[in-house]
Image (tube, grey):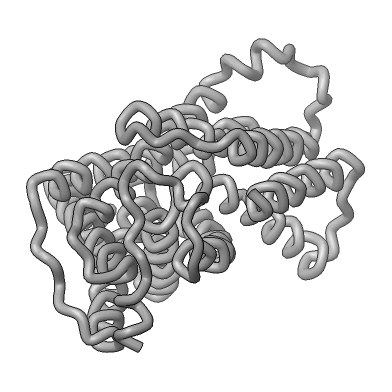
Amino acid sequence: MADLWHSRERPETKTSGAGRHGDAVELWIPITIVAAFVQNLRSGLQRHMRMRMGTTGATFVRFGFGLPVAFALLGLVLWLTGSTPPQTNPAFWIWVTVGACAQIAAQALLVIMFTRRSFAVGSAYSRTEPIQAVIFGLVLLGERAPASVLLAIAISVGGVIVLTFARQPAGQSPRSTSVLARLLSPTALIGLASGTFFGLSAVAYRAASLSLSGPNFMVQAGITLCVAITMQTVVMLVWMLARDRAELRRVADAWRIGALTGLAGALASFGWFSAMTLQQAGAVKALAQIEMLFAYATTVLVFREPVNRAEIAGCALVAAGVIVLVLA
C-alpha cells in the first residue's frame, strides 16, 4: 500500500490536474462525493446543536470534537502508507493560518444563518463558494480554470440558487418582498460573506498542502487538517474562556451529539483537503454541490416530503453541472 500512495504524482500548485493522467487525477472525484455526503450529515447535526447553544459553541463543536479524530486519521494514514511526516515551511504556516481563520469566520456566519427566517436566501449566496474559490485561486495561486470547469460551476451554482428559492417559508408569498430587497437583505449579505470566507479557506488549504514536500497527498492533507483544526480549537477555546464560560458548559453538556458532529466534520474535512491537494479548489467545491442532491434525496426518501417543479429543475441543474465537471 505504501508503494501505491508513493507512486501517485503530486500535483503542482499552478496546475489543475486536468492535463495529467493516472489514478491520482481521478481519485479526487469519489473523495469529494463521499466528503459531501458526510458534510450533509454534519450540517444536520450542527443545526441541531445550534438549538442547544449559541453561535460560538455550535461553531466550536466542529473543531473541538473533531481534533482527536483528525489526529487519529493522520496516524492511520502514516501507519498504512509507512510514511513519515514531511518538514513544514514558512509558506505552509502562512497559508494554513489564513485558511483556519477564514474557515472560523465562514462557519460562524453559516451558523448565524441557521437562526434567521430567510435562511434559504443566505444559503443560496453561501453556495457561491466555488465561483469565489476560482477567483481566489487565480489571484493568489495563478491557477486558471478551463472553460468547461467554469461552465460546470455556473450550472451547478445556478441549480443551487434555484433550489434555495424554490420553497418559500411558510406564510410568505414569493412576491412579498422585491428581488432587490432580497438581494440586499442582511441574510443574503451574511451568506455572501460566508461563501467568500469558505472560498478563501479552500484555496489557502490547497496552497498549504501543496507547499509540503510529500510524501503523498493523504499525508499532506492530514497534516494540514491537524494543524488547522488545532489552531481553530485553541482560538475558539481561548475566546470562550475569556468571554463566555457558560457556553463551554453547554458544549460539555451536549458532548454526545458534539462527538458525532466532530467525527463527521473531521471526516468531511479530511476528504476536502485530500481532494483539494489533487485538484483546484473551485472544481472540488463545484462537485461538492452534489451535497444538495443528498439533502433532497433525504427529504423525499426519508421524510416523504413532496417536491415542486422548481426543486426538480434545480436538482437537474446541479446534476448537470456535476456531469459536465466530471466529463471535463
Going 38% across and 47% down the picture, which residue do you hit?
54
- What number of labels is visible? 0
Going 42% across and 38% down the picture, which residue do you hit?
199
Residue 228, quarter of the rendered image: bottom left
Task: Describe residue 14's horizontal placement relative to residue 287 as left or right.
Answer: left
Q: Position of residue 302 (x, y in %)?
A: 77, 69
Of residues 157 and 121, the one nearer the viewer is 157
Of residues 53 and 145, the one nearer the viewer is 145
Going 53% across and 43% down the picture, which residue do you hit?
114
Above or below: residue 67 compared with residue 58: below
Q: Position of residue 303 (x, y in %)?
A: 78, 65
Tell me if residue 120 can be seen: no
Above or below: residue 232 compared with residue 267: above
Q: Position of residue 5 (x, y in %)?
A: 35, 77
Task: Describe residue 12's horizontal placement relative to residue 87 as left or right.
Answer: right
Going 32% across and 50% down the picture, which residue do you hit?
12
**Quarter of the image with the N terminus in it:** bottom left
Q: Position of residue 172 (x, y in %)?
A: 78, 28
Of residues 37 and 6, the one nearer the viewer is 6
Residue 171, quarter of the rendered image: top right
Above or below: residue 283 compared with residue 128: below
Above or below: residue 123 compared with residue 96: above
Tell me if residue 320 can be seen: yes
